[in-house]
Image (tube, helix red, strand yellow):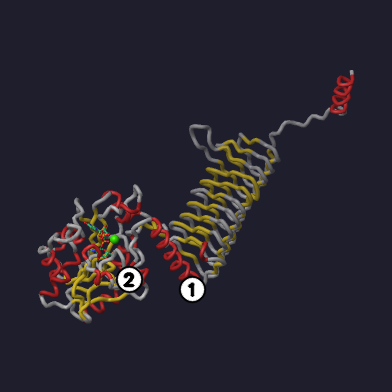
Amino acid sequence: MESNLAAVILAAGKGTRMKSQTAKVLHEIAGQPMLSYPVQAARQVGCDPVQVVVGHQAEEVMAAVTGKQVAFVEQTEQLGTGHALLCAAEALHDFSGTLLLLCGDVPLLRAETLQRMLDVHQHEQAAVTVLTAQLDNPSGYGRIVRSGDAVACIVEEKDATAEQKRIREINTGTYLFDAQFVFSALKNLKTDNAQGEYYLTDVIATAVTDGLPTRAVVLDAIEEGMGINDLQQLAEASRLMRQRINGALMRSGVTMIDPETVYIDATVQVEPGTLVHPNVMLRGATHIGADCIVEMGVMVDDSTVAAAVHLKAGSVIEGSSIGANSKIGPMAHLRPGTQLAGDNKLGNFVETKKAVFGEGSQASHLTYIGDAEVGRGVNFGCGTITCNYDGVNKYKTIIEDDVFVGSDTQFVAPVHVGRNSLIAAGSTITKDVPPDALALSRSEQKVIPGWRLRKQKKAKANKEG
Ligand code: UD1
Ligand code: CA
């Protein structure tokens, strides 16, 4: 679908001040690479195509946002923001609508704000509309030189006069352009400035010379224009994004005792009625159902949790699905491939991996169940271990419905336990067990009366003699 709105997102810069091996726009905010936020905002207002200008670590940057319906253009040498847009202009030369220009390092900008810009831009039939902000400390930014409602020009800090430096309205680096105007204006850019770069901002003066309208839209919330240049600003942006995510969840009916300490990725869903304690992390493709309790120190990654599940303190859940009304933890570790049908209980220090549990099955303490298929109503006693790995291969343990497993049992896989059988405590199960049976494998107990007393007497006699 071609629309009358296209976007170009600048993401070729290195981000030297990040002091990081990772390209700036790949640093994550709420679990998503920074670049994915402007991409999403551009799509939300209907931009198609969305062109991303890549340069530094181009391969990695492209990989981070592929599948999000974006096209890429490479800027091999970073000669300035004007040059960066010129690189994208080739791919868009047939395009004659409105062009939205965003920076890949401005993650907090909202689609609602872009829509407000679009309304002004269209209403005023402007050639350029720039998003600005009033800052108490404008240093480092390009300054907006106004002429009434119009923008006369933008002056970079390094090129500004002392008087211009006192201007507090700054350029956020977000613009709407009449595409044909900007592509032709870019061709005339010069590098006669303090940084010897092609400044995109110079096209504003060109519009004024051509007698075309220029406008500014001032941000209400200045953090939306925040550009990330170092890791301190990254943490600050993450904090603001967290407030946004948690705020929206609380307004939708999720209770948080201390939202400042709750870390929920932008990709996570939490249903109303759920209570989240402090110091919780919910990451990736995670869905938490209604009326759950998520206690202190819980981490859930890429997992689905159904309604009314109680995740107790310190539990870690990865790549798993938990059926309704289950109780997990404290201190349980559900590793990838754990699937609980519902009404399950996995208690203190229980670890599972690739384990499918039928309804109502439980392991209350100190247990490892891996590579296992467990039926309904199975009870594992304390200290059950599936021995699924012989150092080379992994083998499966199958336990049918209603099996009762006594404490301190090892299942040496592959092994199959039939329904309704009972495994005596302390057994090492190496052979299949038929249904309804008792299996026990411990050796018979031997008792030698008076043994210890005789030992003690002998020791005493030796010492005195
Ligand atoms: C730019 C603006 C300045 C504005 C500020 C807002 C110009 C000349 N100045 O300055 O008015 O206040 O942004 O943050 O535009 N990029 C490329 N290729 C390049 C150069 C930059 O892709 O050759 C990308 C960067 O990766 C970054 C964005 O463009 O995402 C902005 O570049 P940056 O160097 O940070 O511009 P500033 O000097 O901060
Ligand atoms: Ca910048």
Residue sitting at 55 percent across and 44 percent down?
Answer: 372
* Residue at (12, 67) in percent of width and height: 185
Pointer 2 residue: 111
Tell me which residue sits at (52%, 69%) in the image.
254
The residue at the far front in this view is 162
Q: CA distance from mark 2 to mark 1?
A: 20 Å
**Mark 2 CB near ligand 1 (8 Å cut):** no
**In terms of image quadrants, where is residue 436?**
top right
In this view, the residue in front, 398 or 278, is 278
> Would you say 399 lies left or right of 184 here?
right
Q: Earlier in the sequence, mark 2 or mark 1?
A: 2
Report if residue 74 is visible in the image.
Answer: no
Quarter of the image with the N terminus in it = bottom left
354 or 9: which is nearer to us? Answer: 9
Residue 153 visible: yes
**Mark 1 belongs to which amino acid?**
Arg
User: Residue sitting at 30 percent across and 56 percent down?
Assistant: 67
- What secondary structure is marked by label 2? helix
Q: Secondary structure at mark 1?
A: helix
Residue 3: where, in percent of width, then height? 21, 70
Quickly name the residue at label 1: 251
